[in-house]
Amino acid sequence: MSDFTAPSGETVKFYSYGQIKYCSLDEIENITKQAIKETLDRLKTLQSEHTLNLNYCLVSEQISSKAIYIHAQNQLHGYTENEAAYHNRISARQILESLLDNQPHLDVEYFAAELRNEFFKNLEARVEDEVVGLTEQNYLRITEMFRHLYILPKIDVEKLCQLLNPSERFSKIQKIDIFRYTKLIGKICVEPILKGIPHYLNKHNSFYLPTAITLLDEHEVSQCAGQINEAITTNENLLTLLFEYNNLIAAHLDSQFQVESKITDCDDENPHSTNVGDYDARLTKQLRINILPVKDAEAEINA
């Protein structure tokens, strides 16, 4: 890999990591964080581990989205790697402004930035691993999806956290779930609806939601059904979401199945009432969640 000199005489010099002019993806985080820390130290800007992580996530998003575009210019449009890098470079001023001027840690929730950063890291890794077999249509579909995720409001990011893998108790986004979700998006041959949480619609306007659910056998299917039923009894937010998004597309599943629950509304004004009439007056709702493999979901969406 060589430096690139443009007709104007300007040269893009590839940064050297020791004796080589590239580094592996698993080294990028430590190198980037160290560069951010050294820069902010020189500027005498107060920082903590929390703000360092946040700034890394935001800078990483900025660089990763540009790197993915450069991959496409090289693989799909015939530009050399160094020429594509020259024409799509990010100035140091832009990066510095994103760290200092916008003060992102004041108006962006940390977990949302972390989630978006993990999505972009997985997308970049996937493009690098599968770039030869990635069609331009799939590339555009995936990048549009992740561009949408990047600007998703915090409230929708919170919903996505709940729905990414509803059979697991949510406490922190799991990287394996993001990997599975990313891979699934590339497999679904239907244009997503990029309004709110990314989803698909059938002719009856029923929602179909991509998830990270991965079930390898009948035992795991049975476990998943039990875990979802348990989760909705303790997580009212998840319950409300599943009434709306009740068709879940699994990242891996052999045959579709249903999770059924009867949900009884509580008497909020008198939860301890022993009057039989009060119990009879409570509403019982039927919740039916359909969990589908990709091929079944595509057939229903396209029917």
Image (cartoon, rainbow, N blue to C red):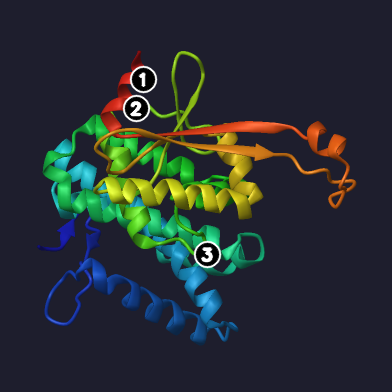
Q: CA distance from mark 2 to mark 1?
A: 5 Å
Q: Quadrant of residue 257?
A: top left
Q: Earlier in the sequence, mark 1 or mark 3?
A: 3
Q: Position of residue 15 (x, y in %)?
A: 23, 71
Label 1 amino acid? Answer: Glu
Q: Which residue was labeled with disc 1? A: 300
Q: Secondary structure at mark 3?
A: loop
Q: Residue at x 34, y 72 (%)?
A: 29
**Disc 3 designates what residue?**
171
Q: Are marks 1 and 3 in contact (CB under 8 Å)?
A: no
Residue, disc 2: 297
The vertical placement of 63 against 208, above or below, is below
| Residue type of the residue flagged with mark 3 | Ser
Decide if residue 250 is on the left or right side of residue 241: left
Residue pictured at 79% horizontal, 33% vertical: 280
Q: Can residue 166 be seen here?
A: no
Quarter holding the C terminus is: top left
Q: Judging from the image, what secondary structure is the residue with disc 1 in?
A: helix
At mark 2, the secondary structure is helix
**Image coordinates for residue 220, horizontal then vertical, percent:** 32, 51
| Crowd around label 2: few <14 · some 14–19 · many ≥20 (10 Å) | many
- Position of 272 with respect to 237 (left or right) is right
How far, Cα to Cα, is label 1 from label 3? Answer: 32 Å
